[in-house]
Image: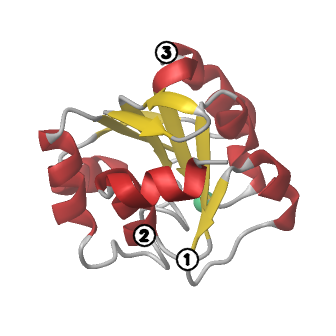
Amino acid sequence: MKYDVSEVGEIEINTIVFDLNGTLQVQGSIPEGVRERLAKLRELGFSLVFFTGDARGNAHEIAEELGIEFRKCVNGAEKEAAMSDFDKETTAAIGNARIDIGTFRNAKLAIGTLQAEGIHTGILKHIDVLVPSINDALDFFLDEAAFKATMRT
Ligand SMILES: [Mg+2]
């Protein structure tokens, strides 16, 4: 999807990479409303993928439930390396912790989600936008006006 941002120019985002724990999943469960928003993003043509070490052993289940693919990445270096499969210029990343820094570095746009699990302050300099919840992060891409208002200069 292309966002025409005032004084910045066009920002095109086609892929969104998610962290799982503390991001897509909060305290072990997927917040209400996430599945529907992911479906809307898919309909709009976004490619969606999450990176996880699969510590809870349920990544396959979650991927199936949400209808999105995942990559197994056990640490920050693996997450960073996995980003090379995506075009940095058109990929956004959403996460909450220091393990996501490599993901953020290789994304055009990085979003931090606060939620109940919190956010590590060490990642603040690597994120562009901080939102309270995963649903707000997903709405950021669905609501063109909000995207443009936050990203403009
Ligand atoms: Mg996390």
The CA span between labels 1 and 3 is: 28 Å
Is mark 1 in CB contact (under 8 Å) with mark 2? yes
Residue at the location (59% across, 31% down)? 108
Residue at the location (65% across, 21% down)? 81
Circle 1 or circle 3, nearest the eye: 1
Q: Where on the picture, by quarter, is residue 3?
A: top left
Q: Position of residue 151 (x, y in %)?
A: 58, 49
Ligand 1 picture quarter: bottom right
The residue that label 2 is drawn on is 136
Residue at the location (25% across, 42% down)? 68
Is mark 1 in CB contact (under 8 Å) with mark 3? no
Amino acid type, label 2: Asp
Label 3 lies in ligand 1 vicinity (Cβ under 8 Å):
no
The CA span between labels 1 and 2 is: 7 Å
Name the colouring of the figure: secondary structure
Residue at the location (35% across, 62% down)? 139
Q: In the rendered image of this protein, does residue 137 appear above or below residue 91?
A: below
In this view of the protein, can residue 58 be seen by the observer?
no
Circle 3 or circle 2, nearest the eye: 2
Secondary structure of the residue carrying numbered label 2: helix
For the residue pair 102 and 149, the one nearer the viewer reads as 149
Q: Earlier in the sequence, mark 3 or mark 2?
A: 3
